[in-house]
Image (cartoon, helix red, strand yellow):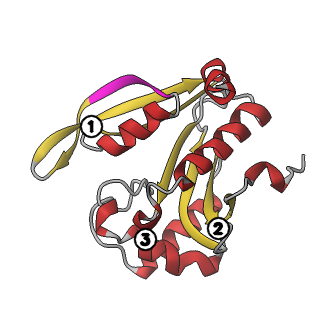
Amino acid sequence: MKINAEIFRNENIFLRAFEPDDVSVLHAYLNHPALTGRRYIPWSISNDLPLSRAQAEAILEKWAKAEKQFHLAVVARDMEKVIGHANCDWGWDPHCPHISLVLAPDYHRQGYGSEALNVLLSYLFEHTQAHNVGGGMNDWNQAARAFAQEHGFSESGTMRRAGLRNGEFSDWIGVDILRPEWQAVKGA
């Protein structure tokens, strides 16, 4: 089945496959200090330590070979510039994919994240069998919690002491949104 690329576009952003030429921008924004602990990259690579260019290349290679998941570049249409990434993993159940969205800090609070999330959710709820889309964040990431809530996600569970930050335990907060909840938010 061929997917229409317009599904992954709106007025200000589009989602596309990563290309090898994207390694420099990926390397740059993943190393931004504001993303420490919230890069949402493969488990085998530290979410806190600085990344080498070779590690950024390895991330793109891993994403390109991934099965039962996709990793897309978030591109600002006005600049034709990669400003982040959107990931979706439905490995354990195609009805309940898990997503993450990361933008370079220079593009936070400008509406790009909301638009990328809306494009991603529209694709999942309108073109796949997903009936529940989940995600998560550390309990200290209040901005991500507020963002998820603003977009209709509910907190669905807590994994206690799931990580360390500054020598203290942190919890992982699971969030999800059901298809009817998304339809209600979308229609509002």
Measured Cα–Cα span from mark 3 to mark 2:
14 Å
Q: Is residue 184 above or below residue 32?
A: above
Residues rendered magenta in the picture: 153-159
Measured Cα–Cα span from mark 3 to mark 1:
22 Å
Residue 83: x, y in percent?
54, 67
Q: What residue is rendered at 37% in x and 37% in y?
A: 145
Q: Which mark is residue 60?
A: none
According to the image, label 2 marks what residue? 18
According to the image, label 3 marks what residue? 29
In the image, what residue type sits under mark 1?
Answer: Asp
Decide which of 8, 43 is in the foreground and name it.
8
Labels 3 & 2 near each other (Cβ < 8 A): no
Q: What residue is rendered at 65% in x and 38% in y?
A: 121
Q: Is residue 17 above or below residue 111?
A: below
- Image quadrant in which the C terminus is located: top right
Mark 3 or mark 1: which comes first in sequence?
A: 3
Decide which of 27, 182 is in the foreground and name it.
182
Q: Is residue 145 left or right of residue 14?
A: left
Which residue reaches farthest top? 180
Q: Is residue 104 above or below residue 140?
A: below
In the image, what residue type sits under mark 2?
Answer: Phe
Measured Cα–Cα span from mark 1 to mark 2:
30 Å
Labels 3 & 1 near each other (Cβ < 8 A): no
Which residue reaches farthest left? 167
The crowd level at tag 2 (other Cα within 10 Å; few <14, some 14-19, many 20+) is some
In the image, what residue type sits under mark 3?
Answer: Tyr
